[in-house]
Amino acid sequence: MSSVGNQAPTGTRPSSFSSIFELWNRKLHYYIGLYLLFFVWLYSLTGLLLNHSTWQFQQFWPSRRVSAEERLIQDPAPGSDLQQARELMRQFGIRGEIALPVARPTPARLEVRANRPGYNYVILADLSQSRARLETTHVNAWGVVRALHEFIGVRLTGSGTRRNWIVTSVWALSMDAVSLGLIVMVVGGYYLSWRLPRKRAWGVVALGLGVLCCGAFVFGFLWPWS
C-alpha cells in the first residue's frame, strides 16, 4: 500500500522557529508602528516646543485667563482629605488630578489643588462658614499641547504620589505602552536590518553612531568636568 497520502504536499515543509519569529516580528513592527504613529507625532511636536520655548507663537502663559468665584457649599461628609476634595470638586463641577497639601492648617480649612491639561484649579474652603473660593487658570491650545508632554499626574515630592484621576491613570498606561512599543520596534527593526546582508554594514554604522552620540551626552552630562 502506498504512503503517498501521508506525505506533505510537494514544495512545503514545516515552518522553522526563525521563520515564525520573523513573520510575527514583521506583524508587530507594522501594527505597533500604527499604534505609536500619533503618539510619536505628539511627543515630537511637544518636545520641539519645549526645546524652543522662546518662539513667540507659543507664549501661552501671558495670555492665560484667570477667573474666580465664591459660593456657599454643602460641607463634605467626614472622611479623608481626598474624599472631601472630590466632593468639593463635584460641587463646583470640575475634574482633574488632585494634589493635596502636606497638612491642613486647621480641620475647618481645606485647600484643594487640581489640574488637567489646560486648566489649573485652586479651591480654598472654609468649612466653618460653609463657603469656598475657586480660582481657575486656563491656557490656550499651545499650553495644552505642552502640558501633555510633562503631564504625569503625580508629584515627585510631598503628598499626592499616587494618581487619583482615572484619565491620568489611563494616560500613564498609554505612555507605558508607547515606551514598551518603541523598545520592541527598535529591537525588531535591528533584527530586520540584520536580515538584509546588503544593508547590514550601513545598519551597523548607523547603530554605532547612535550609541556614540547618545553615550557622549549621557556620560558627558554626568562627568565632573562637564
Image: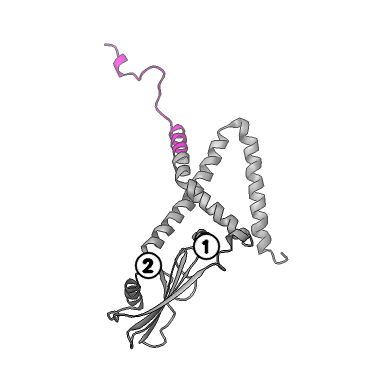
Residue 143's disc is: 1
First in sequence: mark 1 vs mark 2: 2
Residue 124, compared with residue 89, is above or below; it is below
Screen quadrant of the C terminus:
bottom right
Screen quadrant of the N terminus:
top left
Q: Residues within 10 Å of mark 2 (few under 14, many from 20)?
A: some
Residue 141, compared with residue 157, is above or below; it is above
Where residue 201 sits, quadrant-wise, is top right
Magenta-drawn segment: 1-27
Marks 1,2: beta carbons within 8 A: no
Extreme-right residue of the structure: 225
Residue type pointed to by label 2: Arg
Say which residue label 2 marks: 95
Q: Is residue 4 magenta?
A: yes
Badge 2 marks a residue whose secondary structure is loop
Q: Is residue 23 left or right of residue 80?
A: right
Residue 197 drawn at (x, y percent)? 60, 31
Q: Is residue 5 magenta?
A: yes
Camera-side residue of 70 and 173: 70
